[in-house]
Image: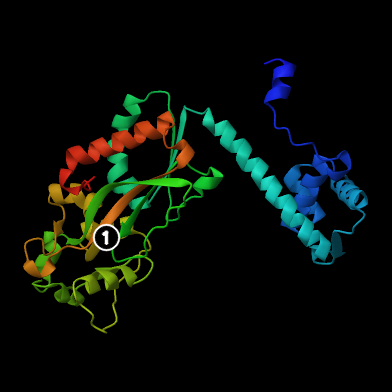
Amino acid sequence: MSEDRLQQSSVTTPLPSRKALPPFEALRAFDAIARLGGVRRAAEYLCRDHGVISRHLRTIEEWTGTRLIDRTPGGAVLTADGLRYHKIVAGAMDAIANGTVDLMRRGDNHRLRIRCMPGFALNWLSARLGDFERSHPGLDLEIRPTDRSPDLLSNHADVDIRFVAEYGVQLEIPPECRSVEFASSPIVAVATRDYLARFPQIREPRDLLKHQLMHEDNFDRWRNWLASHHVYDDAELTGPRLWQGHLTLDGARHGRGVALTNYLLAADDLKNRSLVEIGSELPSFMPRALGIWHLITKLDRTDASPVRHFREWLLSVVRKEHPQLVPPT
């Protein structure tokens, strides 16, 4: 594009005066000092000499004619003017950083970063992912199991996969993101046949209170599941807390007790009969509690080829293996 055409296509708002824009390196140093609480920490973060960062700070203060930082034995403390100014500077720095990463990612069709629940990664995705990898050679694939949803808006990931029980806290999808519900999965109690043979027979959900229940980080999941089956006993729940669902499921595989999981994650175990679904043929366990699997993407990355290919692959596998779990469209 010629310079004349570039001038015609550019935004017509006037440039700020040069006096209104301090040097960028000085602004960056001030932002780092304010966020990290000291000149030395900012120098380490920016890989600059301590004296250089101090000079950048003096540049900003001389440029604005305002003291922005008070130095105390505990570190740098923002003045009232410094707090107000840093709020503006930090917002601008974050906008520039996010915009730059977003621009870099728009042309990145060779990398896919997936965040998902650990149980989904271990008990379902891992065994099937080889098929996707063979279909997309050369794709730089990164899977990171995590219990916390990533900040998709800050480009921490391309895809997030979450499961939400119908009786739990509902998932809030930011307007800048899109969610595809790819499976509606029953939430079930599972154990081995050997374990069940050693303990009292289970005829209704309340009978589970007599068994070894395995929990994640707290007792809420079991308490909510029992309540969904009209069991509101005040008796305190007991049993080991293993913090993550893939550990409770593995504990059930080893005959340690009863785990609460969702059907998609336990499907392979139920198929090979290493686990059984408790109450699957008993009316008292019906209707089964449900939850929804969500595949979440940022709107402007939804149709990027790696994201689209993974979404289409995931939906096709679920439709093939578990057509009964596919939500109605």
Instruction: Identify the image quadrant of residue 283.
Output: bottom left
Mark 1 surroundings within 10 Å by alpha-carbon count, few (fewer than 14), some (14 through 19), many (20 or more): some
Residue 193 spot, x, y in % from top left: 11, 60
Q: Which residue is mark 1?
A: 251
Above or below for 271 versus 209: above
Asked whether residue 318 appears in the rendered view, the answer is: yes
Question: Can residue 79 be seen in this snapshot?
Answer: no
- The residue under the point 23% across, 82% down is 233
Residue 318 location in percent, x, y?
23, 41
**In terms of depth relative to the viewer, which is nearer, 233 or 298?**
298
Please indicate whether residue 118 sits to the left or right of residue 8 in the image: left
261 over 112 or under it: above or below: below
Quadrant (top left, top right, bottom left, bottom right) of the C terminus: top left
Amino acid at dot 1: Gly
Q: On the image, which quarter does residue 234 sit in?
A: bottom left
> Could you tell me which secondary element the residue under label 1 belongs to?
helix
Q: Is residue 79 left or right of residue 166?
A: right
- Above or below — where is 173 with respect to 285? above
Counting every numbered tag in the picture gives: 1
Residue at image x 48%, y 42%?
157
| Residue located 53% across and 46% down the image | 153
Depth order, front residue of 328/96: 328
Residue at 23% across / 80% down in the picture? 232
Assign the N terminus to one quadrant of the image: top right
**Residue 24 coordinates in the image, percent (x, y):** 80, 40
